[in-house]
Image (spheres, rainbow, N blue to C red):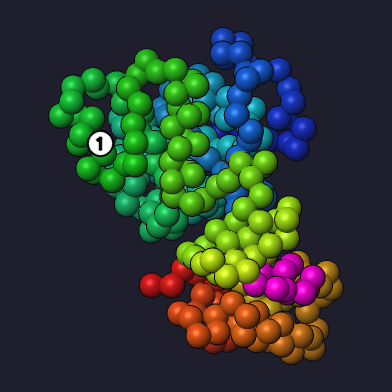
Amino acid sequence: MMSDAQAAPAGTTGRAAPAGQPGRTGRSAPIRRLDGSPIRVLVVDDEPSLAELLASVLRYEGWEILTAGDGASAVRAAREFRPEAVVLDIMLPDFDRLEVLRRARQESPHVCVLSLTAKGAVADRVAGITAGGDDYVTKPFSLEEVLARLRGLLRRAGLARSRGETELVVGDLSMDEDAREVRRGDELIDLTATEFELLRFLMRNPRRVLSKAQILDRVWNYDFGGQAHVVELYISYLRKKIDANREPLIHTVRGVGYVLKPAS
């Protein structure tokens, strides 16, 4: 059954590590979603003590964690919670893990899946990967190994970045947030302050369609109400600077909003 444990409070990243957890004083900088919000992870295991131990370790990273004890709860949680990563026990009491994977990826096609398996044979490990999981760990496992593998999966999938990293990259477009420099390929692009903030919002949400109301709220900090032309105007400014004579990165989704995605 899915636990009541939801997102960790904002202050949990500084609390003491759970008993038995390896020392964490030398850990890497925490990673977060591209828009700066916490990573969401769904932990699926029918052993409540193990699921809660994993959840405690991941909450220590400042991530939002939800746990589920069976396939049905996992599918429901994936639909409602929309995690960036799933830690999935290969043996569940109801659903086959492949069915959980299939349904989870219907909701979130790019979700990373780390499989937990008690089987050590090479054939079983290979089957776990080819069946749709992105990586695996074999029980008994190190908690640090689980965390390291999740970090690697999230970074390779382009779903997360370290809090200390200041560069955003989408295709051949890059932005150094600290230096406030933008380049398309090797060309330095000069942007006004508002253009920079608009592009930053788009780049922190690659492949995500953003409505004009969302853009107004985040970039201009006021409610939507007859101001759509402001967004349209600045999108046109960006296109002239970013996409002129190049394969376009900024796309209009008619009746919805705009999306920034790598050139095909």
Is residue 193 visible to us here?
yes
For the point 58% across and 61% down, which residue is it? 174
Seen in the picture, residue 252 relative to 147 is either above or below; the reply is: below
Magenta span has 198? yes
Read off the residue under disc 1. 128
> Quarter of the image holding residue 173?
bottom right
Q: Is residue 83 above or below residue 16?
A: below
On screen, 77 above or below 66?
A: below
* Residue nearest the observer in this picture, 235 or 78: 235
The percent position of residue 236, horizontal first and vertical second, equals 65, 86
Q: Position of residue 76 (x, y in %)?
A: 47, 49
Residue drawn where x is 63% and y is 20% of the image: 26
Examine the image and state in which quarter residue 194 appears.
Answer: bottom right
Residue placed at 38% from the left, 72% from the top?
Answer: 264
The boundaries of the magenta stretch are 189-199
Magenta stretch prevailing secondary structure: helix
Determine the residue located farthest toward the top in the rendered image: 20
User: Is 222 rendered above or below residue 180?
Assistant: below
- Determine the residue positioned at 40% across, 57% down: 109
Graded by Cα atoms within 10 Å as few (under 14), some (14 to 19) or many (20 or more), the crowding at tag 1 reads many
Along the line of sight, which residue is nearer the eye, 164 or 190? Answer: 190
SS label for mark 1: helix
**What amino acid is labelled 1 in the image?**
Gly
Q: Is residue 224 left or right of residue 163?
A: right
Q: Position of residue 29 (x, y in %)?
A: 64, 33
Left/right of residue 214 with respect to residue 185 in the rendered view: right
